[in-house]
Amino acid sequence: MTHKIIISATIDLPEANLDKALAAARPLIEGALTEPGCLAYDWSIEPTHPGRIRVFELWADEASLAGHFGSEWYLGMRELIGSFGLLSAESAKYRVNLTEPVYDETFTPRADFFTDPG
């Protein structure tokens, strides 16, 4: 059975370098989005933490993510981000075994996994 994989990460840079880093990263982000199995790949400014980029990725499976790690887009991003004064970075991957809507048929937000009979 294959599972989708979510990557959630933060990248901290000197605040003065944030806009330049995002502009420089754009072609690499766009390239990653063309990779087989890349379902989402997004960088955004975190409004509550100056200088922080929030990264969200969604991959179809482990093979797709493994391919990304060997791609020019990933390798270029690692090199690029260091050139903007990387202060810190944290990342984690999550294997997804169930996906369902947040809202049920009555538009009520649900924390429980209400479509899972198990």
Image (cartoon, grey):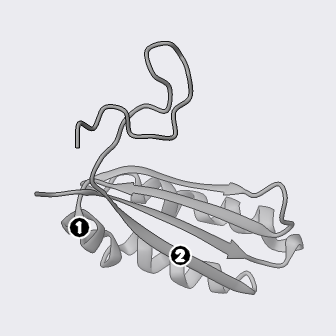
Pinpoint residue 97: horizontal percent, then vertical percent. Answer: 27, 53
Q: In this rendering, would 96 be left or right of 109? A: left
The answer to whether residue 11 is left or right of residue 40 is right
Mark 2 touches mark 1? (CB < 8 Å): no
Please tell me which residue lies in front, 26 or 86. Answer: 86
Q: CA distance from mark 2 to mark 1?
A: 16 Å
Quadrant showing the N terminus: bottom left
Q: At which x and y percent is residue 80?
A: 59, 79
Q: Would residue 32 be seen by someone viewing this image from the given angle? A: yes
Q: Residue at x 75, y 87 (%)?
A: 87
Farthest front residue? 118
Label 2 neighbourhood size at 10 Å, few (<14), some (14-19), many (20+)? few
Image quarter of residue 50: bottom right
Vertical placement of 95 versus 15: above or below? Answer: above
Q: Which mark is residue 26?
A: none
Q: Residue at x 34, y 42 (%)?
A: 99
Residue 24 percent location from the top left of the image: 65, 65
Disc 1, SS: helix
The outermost residue toward the top is: 106
Q: Which quarter of the picture shows residue 90?
A: bottom right
Q: What is the crowding at mark 1: few (fewer than 14 residues within 10 Å), some, or many (at least 20)?
A: some
Amino acid type for the residue under numbered disc 2:
Ser
Three-letter residue code for mark 1: Glu
Q: Which residue is mark 1?
A: 62
- Pinpoint residue 30: horizontal percent, then vertical percent: 48, 53
Where on the picture, by quarter, is residue 7? bottom left
- Quadrant where the C terminus sits is top left
Residue 91 is labelled as 2
Look at the picture and state if 77 lies above or below 82: above
